[in-house]
Image (spheres, helix red, strand yellow):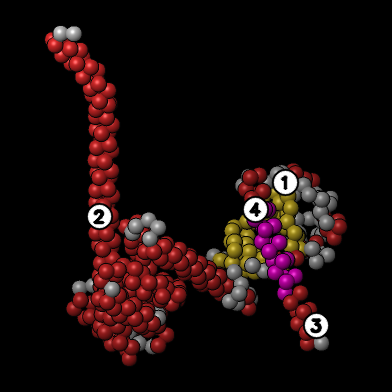
């Protein structure tokens, strides 16, 4: 074979042997590019996550600083009230009036002095994890925050007490005005700070929780403290509501002659309303009296019905709630009130109306133990009947429970 032909054959063989390698290199190039893109995406994602963590760290640091700084200002306000108002007015006012203004403010001041000391220690000794230490210090003292219930219950009396100081105690009034002018703020505004501060804590804890890392100990601690504080606030609000209800009940009972013996700590006023009603006449057993507007007070264990008297009301009936029955007017009357099964013709149309309902005393056999009442509509009548029935059932349960406890006590003593 000539040399030229041999060289051509060799060149073609070389080309054929290099073709698979070139194809492999061309195929590997896109895979390498994809790998580089994925790696770049991972790096960018990691950078974003790191930036987000840094942002949360900064936000958490800001929230912790706000928590500590506002707590310090709040403590300074409490101390200012004690120095400028509470102590100077103590010798100038009767103890009862002094307490009506300041309540248990000294106890709150002591609580927050301890919290301030713990927060200062937490931020200085554990700078790397000051947020966790601050929330731990707050959570440790949280059970003692229940004393805020006493303060919040008393705060509605502050305005009236300050008016009494201005009207009846000139020396204390002068000292009070001078102290307010010196500080440029009214005492009543300063005394509102504890009520306001109790509402701020959940907001601060919520912000710290959102700024902490997911599944971190800081977030868990904030969630626990937030839940405990919400429960505490609900307890305080309920105690305030009960205190206001008791004060209102006391005011009601003092206005009605002959029922002041009902003023007891355990008794609650659940319902009060003006009711159009008739009661049987004492002279004619099968006749109703004149329809009039009466005031009803439904307590936890009694129904007090008051009749109009001048500009106010006087007691008409006081019935144990557990002995009452309530029903729509078309319900068959009880056997003890058989005389009322047949009413005068003028009452038939009224008795058949859906908005009429009856309330009777099951233990009274005489006709005076029944009332015929009117509601604005059938819907209102059904709502009133249902509401009264719920209160009656609760009173019956309470009565039966007291009887059972008395029997158990007698059994144990025997």
The label nearer to you, 2 versus 3, is 2
Q: Is residue 207 above or below residue 123?
A: above
Q: Give the Cα distance between marks 3 and 1.
A: 52 Å
> Residue lying farthest front?
1
Q: Is residue 407 left or right of residue 312?
A: right
> With respect to residue 275, does 174 lie above or below?
below
The answer to whether marks 1 and 4 mark residues whose Cβ atoms lie closer than 8 Å is no
Between 301 and 56, the residue placed more toward the observer is 56
User: What is the x, y in percent for residue 128?
Assistant: 27, 69
Disc 2 from disc 3: Cα separation: 69 Å
Query: The magenta stretch spans which residues?
Result: 384-403
In the rendered image, the quadrant that contains the N terminus is top left
Q: Is residue 356 left or right of residue 22?
A: right
Q: Which mark is residue 342?
A: none
Give the residue furthest to the left: 4
Nearer to us: label 4 or label 3: 3
Disc on the earlier residue, 1 or 4: 1
Which residue position holds label 2?
55
Would you name the residue on which mark 4 appears?
384
Percent x, y of residue 61: 26, 63
Residue assigned mark 1: 350
Q: On the image, numbered disc 3 is attached to which residue?
A: 411
């Amino acid at each position: 074979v000539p040399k030229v032909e041999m060289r051509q054959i060799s060149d073609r063989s070389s080309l054929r042997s290099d073709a698979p390698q070139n194809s492999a290199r061309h195929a590997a190039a896109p895979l390498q590019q994809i790998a580089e893109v994925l790696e770049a995406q991972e790096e960018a994602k990691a950078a974003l996550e790191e930036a987000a963590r840094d942002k949360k760290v900064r936000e958490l640091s800001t929230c912790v600083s706000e928590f500590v700084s506002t707590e310090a200002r709040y403590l300074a306000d409490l101390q200012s009230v004690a120095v400028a108002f509470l102590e100077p007015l103590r010798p100038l006012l009767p103890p009862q009036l002094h307490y009506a203004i300041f309540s248990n403010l000294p106890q709150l001041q002591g609580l927050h002095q301890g919290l301030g000391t713990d927060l200062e220690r937490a931020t200085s000794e554990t700078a790397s994890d000051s947020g966790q230490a601050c929330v731990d210090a707050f959570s440790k003292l949280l059970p003692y925050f229940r004393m805020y219930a006493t303060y919040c219950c008393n705060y509605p009396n502050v305005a009236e007490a300050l008016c009494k100081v201005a009207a009846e105690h000139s020396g204390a009034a002068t000292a009070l005005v001078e102290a307010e002018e010196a500080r440029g703020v009214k005492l009543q505004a300063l005394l509102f700070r504890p009520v306001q501060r109790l509402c701020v804590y959940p907001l601060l804890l919520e912000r710290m929780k959102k700024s902490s890392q997911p599944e971190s100990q800081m977030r868990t601690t904030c969630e626990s403290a937030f839940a405990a504080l919400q429960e505490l606030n609900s307890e305080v609000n309920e105690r305030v509501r009960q205190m206001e209800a008791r004060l209102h009940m006391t005011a009601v009972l003092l206005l009605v002659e002959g029922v002041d013996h009902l003023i007891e700590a355990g008794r609650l006023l659940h319902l009060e309303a003006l009711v159009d009603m008739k009661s049987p006449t004492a002279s004619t057993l099968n006749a109703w009296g004149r329809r009039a507007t009466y005031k009803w007070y439904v307590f936890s264990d009694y129904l007090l019905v008051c009749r109009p008297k001048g500009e106010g009301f006087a007691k008409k009936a006081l019935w144990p709630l557990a002995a009452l029955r309530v029903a729509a007017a078309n319900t068959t009357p009880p056997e003890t009130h058989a005389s009322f099964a047949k009413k005068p013709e003028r009452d038939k149309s009224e008795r058949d109306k859906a908005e009429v309902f009856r309330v009777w005393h099951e233990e009274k056999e005489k006709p005076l133990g029944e009332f015929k009442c009117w509601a604005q509509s059938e819907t209102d009548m059904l709502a009133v009947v249902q509401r009264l029935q719920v209160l009656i059932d609760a009173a019956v349960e309470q009565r039966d429970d007291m009887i059972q406890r008395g029997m158990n006590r007698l059994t144990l003593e025997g």
